[in-house]
Image: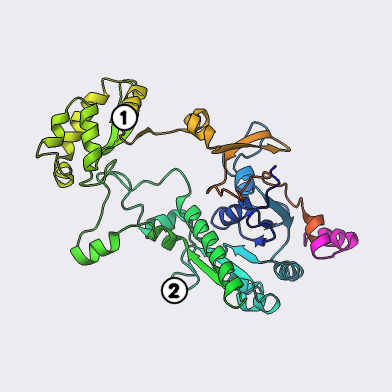
């Protein structure tokens, strides 16, 4: 592991909640050196410990990623004694991350105003389906619902089919990313504008909404509502996936005027760039179908690598649709160290995606995989909160830990 000081070193984060919308926020902060103390219910822990594909030995391969760089403590938050311990722990933290349904923390005596009494500088990141206010605040909300309400499902897929979902938990991860951004913004404000903490309130649906480009003014001012358009963006051409001789696809984006000229040259048809049907952005958009048919006829006669080499030589943006196998074999991924191997005490070396973004002077790092349940009870409750071994054992016996 690198000896370089991490940019968030010295920052203490208490992570409550489960699954992805809160824990991915904790992962992002931990990647850059924050001490992330993950609070889990005794016995089972976070459901992410069993989600996803498993190895033959029964170990999930999702947990080592989502819980990397974290410490695990067990605590029964539904019992008063557990709530008292939680308040003591939060009093020592800079950031609290939670993704319970709104009102849950208040029922446990851990609303922000109560927590702020003991820790005025606390930044509380609250990720939920619909946010902490509004008529929907009390509804249960998962990432998939936020994707639907935020608009991304409506514009994804083909117009003659039902809206599909992405193969990842997009809404949860987006909300968690905005939660991390909000935490760092609030911490900066705390340090430079008076020393007080604040609440960072993120609804999953509104994190999705923030990505929806100009869809709102388009509807409000022109009456146009974007819909599903399959593999293309309307009136942006050529920019599509094209079939190859080896039954693969290559994505080619030659929609800018100068780039289209280079594409036409590479395909052996320089005259296309002067043809009034294709010479401008608007004209290419109007004749998208014709262009895609002509480009497909060319790509179908060549294997994908041949197409990619021709596009690279011509300076035309292109690429394969990568699988995990492609990523692990790709030289650019290797050069950028996009995949890193981390030692796991049960699995051995486990490859996973590396930290993003790259910082030139104080980079982040994957220091450890997801911990075992309650692995850090002694360290956190003993060293940080000053409980004796006897007190910890007694609380474990009573089910507090």
Tell me the quadrant of the picture where the N terminus can be found: top right
Colour scheme of the picture: rainbow
> At which x and y percent is residue 335?
53, 33
Nearer the observer, 305 or 113: 305
> At which x and y percent is residue 124?
59, 68
Disc 1 designates what residue?
311
Nearer the observer, 75 or 175: 175
**Alpha-carbon span between mark 1 and mark 2:** 50 Å
> At which x and y percent is residue 354?
57, 42
Q: Quadrant of residue 214?
A: bottom left
> Which residue occupies 58% across, 73% down?
192
Q: Magenta segment range?
A: 383-401
Nearer the observer, 193 or 101: 193
Disc 2 designates what residue?
134
Instruction: Mark 1 vs mark 2: give the one in front.
Output: 1
Q: Quadrant of residue 86?
A: bottom right
Please report whichever mark, 1 or 2, sits nearer to the chain's N-terminal start. Answer: 2
Nearer the observer, 38 or 42: 38
> Can the viewer see residue 238 in this picture?
no
Bin the neighbour count of mark 2 within 10 Å (Cα to Cα): few under 14, some 14-19, many 20 and up: few
> Can the viewer see residue 181 in this picture?
yes
> Which residue occupies 88% across, 62% down?
388
On screen, residue 91 versus residue 186, left or right, reads: right
- Mark 1: secondary structure: helix
Residue 386 falls inside the magenta stretch: yes
Residue 235 falls inside the magenta stretch: no
> At which x and y percent is residue 91?
71, 71
């Amino acid at each position: 592991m690198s000896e370089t000081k991490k940019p968030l070193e010295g920052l203490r984060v208490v992570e409550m909640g489960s699954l992805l919308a809160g824990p991915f926020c904790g992962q992002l902060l931990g990647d850059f050196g924050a001490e992330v103390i993950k609070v889990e219910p005794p016995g089972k822990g976070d459901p992410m410990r069993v989600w996803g594909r498993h190895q033959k030995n029964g170990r999930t391969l999702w947990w080592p990623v989502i819980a990397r760089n974290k410490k695990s403590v067990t605590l029964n938050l539904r019992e008063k004694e557990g709530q008292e311990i939680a308040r003591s722990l939060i009093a020592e933290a800079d950031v609290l991350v939670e993704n319970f349904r709104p009102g849950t923390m208040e029922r446990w005596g851990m609303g922000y105003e109560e927590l702020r009494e003991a820790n005025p500088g606390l930044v509380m990141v609250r990720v939920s389906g619909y946010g902490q206010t509004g008529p929907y605040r009390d509804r249960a909300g998962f990432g998939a619902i936020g994707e639907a309400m935020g608009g991304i499902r409506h514009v994804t897929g083909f117009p003659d089919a039902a809206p599909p979902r992405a193969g990842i938990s997009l809404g949860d991860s987006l909300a968690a990313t905005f939660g991390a951004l909000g935490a760092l913004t609030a911490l900066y404000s705390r340090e430079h504008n008076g020393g007080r903490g604040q609440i960072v309130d993120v609804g999953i649906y509104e994190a999705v909404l923030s990505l929806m480009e100009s869809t709102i003014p388009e509807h409000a001012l022109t009456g146009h509502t974007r819909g599903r358009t399959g593999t293309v963006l309307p009136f942006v051409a050529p920019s599509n996936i094209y079939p190859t001789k080896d039954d693969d696809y290559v994505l080619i984006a030659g929609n800018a005027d100068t780039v289209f000229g280079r594409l036409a040259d590479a395909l052996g048809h320089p005259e296309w760039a002067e043809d009034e049907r294709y010479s401008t952005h608007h004209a290419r958009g109007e004749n998208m179908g014709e262009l895609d048919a002509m480009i497909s006829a060319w790509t179908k006669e060549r294997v994908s690598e041949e197409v990619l080499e021709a596009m690279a030589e011509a300076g035309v943006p292109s690429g394969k649709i990568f699988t995990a196998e492609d990523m692990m074999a790709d030289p650019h991924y290797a050069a950028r160290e996009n995949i890193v191997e981390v030692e796991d005490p049960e699995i051995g070396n486990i490859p996973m995606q590396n930290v993003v973004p790259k910082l030139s002077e104080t980079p982040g790092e994957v220091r450890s995989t997801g911990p075992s349940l309650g692995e850090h009870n002694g360290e956190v409750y003993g060293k940080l909160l000053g409980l004796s071994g006897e007190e910890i054992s007694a609380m474990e016996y009573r089910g507090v830990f």
